Image (tube, rainbow, N blue to C red):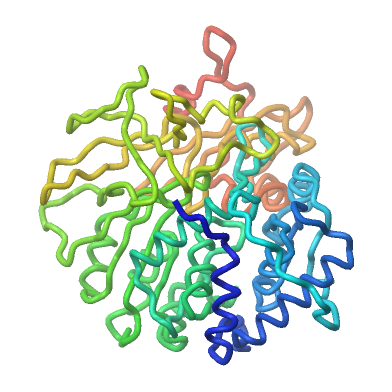
Amino acid sequence: MSDRSLIAPVIDSFARHADRPAVTDADGRVATYAELDLLSRRFGARFLDAGVKIGDRIGFSRPKSIETVAALIGALRIGASFVPVDHSAPEHRNEHIFEDCRVALRCGEDLLPAEQAGAIEDCPSDPDRLAYILYTSGSTGLPKGVPLTHRNAASFVDWCVRTLEPRVGDVFSSHASFHFDLSVLDLWVPLWTGGSIAITPPDVAQDPRRLPNFIVERGITNWYSVPSILALMVEFGRLEDLAFDRLRTICFAGEVFPLPMLRRLREQLPEVRLLNLYGPTETNVCTWYEVPGRIDANRTEPMPIGTACDHCDVALFDDAGQRVDEVGQVARVLARGAPVMNGYWGRPPEETPSLLTIDGQRWYDTGDLGEWDQVRGGERQIVFRGRRDRMVKRHGYRIELGEVEAGLDRHPDVQESAVWSGEIEGRVVIHAAVVPRDGATLGVIPLKLHCAAALLSWMSPDRFQVMDALPRTSTGKVDYATLRGA
């Protein structure tokens, strides 16, 4: 278990790698470690001037940039924590998040660093101090906060350093938004090890035809994204026409990588390490699997999520709380150890049903199902077998269908709604049924426009149907089984 803070190795890098590039902005601006050091201290001074104290939380709603990276570092240097949100999300969602965690200060684009760094001193390290809170989709229709300490985060970054073996001068992609847990690797692994962060321009980030050229032009050595982005790059990026001379590692996480596309990626980049990383926000990455140099031609199902990372423990349990060790039995995926959160923000651990005590040890129930694969090379692998609840993953984001329903229900002409998911050719599709209020008329286009304003873009349903009434079970609950078959 790491006893370091998340920020201490970064401060060490400021001294050791002062003249090396630390961050390249979306527009190509470069900040060295010395420049990032000064800018982060200036932001720290601004936060102190605003009254931020050790243990306070700072809300961040601003695009990715050199300044945003420096501000995040500045928050940690003065002993505060950061709460990043999607600056393009509906205002009411971000407002709820900032009010829920009672931020002491909101850092938007208009908040500038102090003119001078002043005489700020780095706050003494405390591994158990809160480092950041990431908000995820909540079953009540409101997002819930996942608080992670320096110890939680540093244990994961330590594992990344051991596993990825980064070198001084490596370039890590920054594709994920800072409110998404994939960004933890993107930011802190290079800053710990003398590498640099290459922020992906927003207009390039979702364009699979331009992303491969961006990887080559920026000399990226380590790429990390959700599988859907990589699959699009395989399909439309003409990878075979480019020379990825510096690219050594591709990590992917957040959703299942369809095997046909993964096989094509493996064939197009035979010398690159491909790592399947698994874990919810509450644990960060807790299992991993390295895709072999050649994928068995007879394999038809996705690759395993692998085995536990060496900084935590992952096991399968049945509903009676007994470990499942037999091959072929589907069971719950549980994790424990250094990277696992202590409970959701504002809720004590004993009021968090997903935190279980089994044989005197506390485990986090991921809500996922898995089974042990056949023993290969003396090591068993866990295979992902889906979700136990109504939470789905799409484009790497975790989506609670109850939050989508809550967003639809905010439409003034919607009486009630029901949302469910399905799959088409391996792609998650979100369906919505809505019942209009008396006398109201609902069309697909107005519903889509409402969702664009009320929900995050990746939560919006793909398909809508308007119904006179929702089907019900004998107990009066919405009959989702009937809706799925409709």
On the image, the x and y values in percent for residue 370 come to 31, 36
Above/below status of 289 relative to 328 = below
The picture quadrant where one finds residue 11 is bottom right
The picture quadrant where one finds residue 250 is bottom left
Is residue 227 visible to us here? no
Residue projecting furthest to the front: 124
Residue displayed at 79% across by 36% down: 412
Q: Is residue 102 left or right of residue 199?
A: right
Q: Is residue 184 left or right of residue 335?
A: right
Residue displayed at 33% across by 55% down: 257
Residue displayed at 71% across by 30% down: 436
- Total marks shown come to 0
On the image, the x and y values in percent for residue 316 come to 31, 32
On the image, the x and y values in percent for residue 361 come to 43, 29
Residue projecting furthest to the bottom: 19
Is residue 215 visible to us here? yes
Q: Is residue 29 left or right of residue 371?
A: right
In front of the other: 286 or 293: 286
Above/below status of 389 relative to 242 = above
In front of the other: 292 or 34: 34
Above/below status of 273 relative to 340 = below
